[in-house]
Image (cartoon, rainbow, N blue to C red):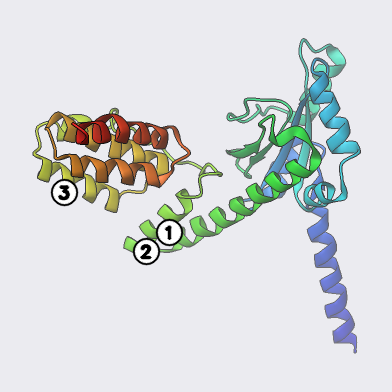
Amino acid sequence: MIRHLFLLSLSLLLVIGTHAQAGLTRSYSEALKKAGNDKPIILFCYGANFDQVGKAAYDAIMRDSDKELKRVLNKEIYVVIPIYQFPNEKEQAEFKRIMGKHKLPGGIWSYPCFAIVDGKGNFRGAVQSAAQMENPKIVQEALTKLLGDFDKQQKLLAQASRASGANKRRLMREALSITSIKPPDHEPFDPANNGMVQKIQLMSIAEANRYIRGTLAEGIFTPVERQMIMATYAGHLRRNNAPVDLLRAVYTEMRNIDPTSIYGAYAEGALEIWVDSVGKK
């Protein structure tokens, strides 16, 4: 009986401790400490003294929001950050109290917004478009999805850190394929800056194909980076008068990696300009 009560008390303490780690946090520094390596931090940033839309969003979302959004926020570590334009002394002190020596993470381009960062302060994603910020229900749905994607990516990255070889590369590619979340500490790959364009310049079509396919198979790239590599390959094919069917296959593959990205749109246009129009002649 005593052992049962002890275990029950311990479980209650664990529950209380878990809830104590979530919810509104007074400062960004405190939130970073709470988050550790795995938990996300939500930053609600709004124009406090210059933006009527931002102030209205604060009132609607932080004061009068529906229960579903409040439930999402209260399960997570979150910080409210007022953004001041030409702040007075009091406003400067308030911002410094919240942010300390930290700067707002890069990736925030609009207020009001909900930004997701990890325990190291890496920007991972945001709900910040005007359409998303229209009302608390839309915010709640977008934020819930973003948090779910964050957790999924974190689990895959953790599995990848324990794996090796082909399995490690597979897990990393799967983690990087979650395009709504920016991976932490990922050095962007640019074919032009990494010498790929120059390297394949003197290759035959067959040699370039082997090189590109080998690079994609061995490397760890985000979907957009894979599209950039495919665009480099397609440019080489065009310069070497490759068959139309091969160009069609490459641009179709490039588009299908992520049709919503700028490179996906470029591939769609290239299919029309460089493939379909040529095939009709």
Quadrant that contains the C terminus: top left
* Number of callouts: 3
Residue under label 2, please give it: 167
Please tell me whether residue 265 is drawn above or below residue 74 in the rendered image: above
Residue under label 1, please give it: 171
Q: CA distance from mark 1 to mark 3?
A: 23 Å
Q: Residues within 10 Å of mark 2 (few under 14, many from 20)?
A: few
Residue placed furthest toward the front: 280
Q: Residues within 10 Å of mark 1 (few under 14, many from 20)?
A: many
Residue 106 shows in the view: yes
Among numbered discs 3 and 2, the one appearing first in the sequence: 2
Looking at the picture, how far across and down is residue 46, in whole percent?
77, 27
Badge 2 marks a residue whose secondary structure is helix
Looking at the picture, how far across and down is residue 176, in whole percent?
46, 49
Picture quadrant of residue 265: top left
Is the Cβ of the residue at disc 1 closer than 8 Å to that at disc 3?
Answer: no
Q: Residues within 10 Å of mark 3 (few under 14, many from 20)?
A: few
**Residue 215 shown left or right of residue 131 in the figure:** left
Three-letter code for the amino acid on which mark 1 is drawn: Leu
Three-letter code for the amino acid on which mark 3 is drawn: Arg
Badge 3 marks a residue whose secondary structure is helix
Residue under label 3, please give it: 210
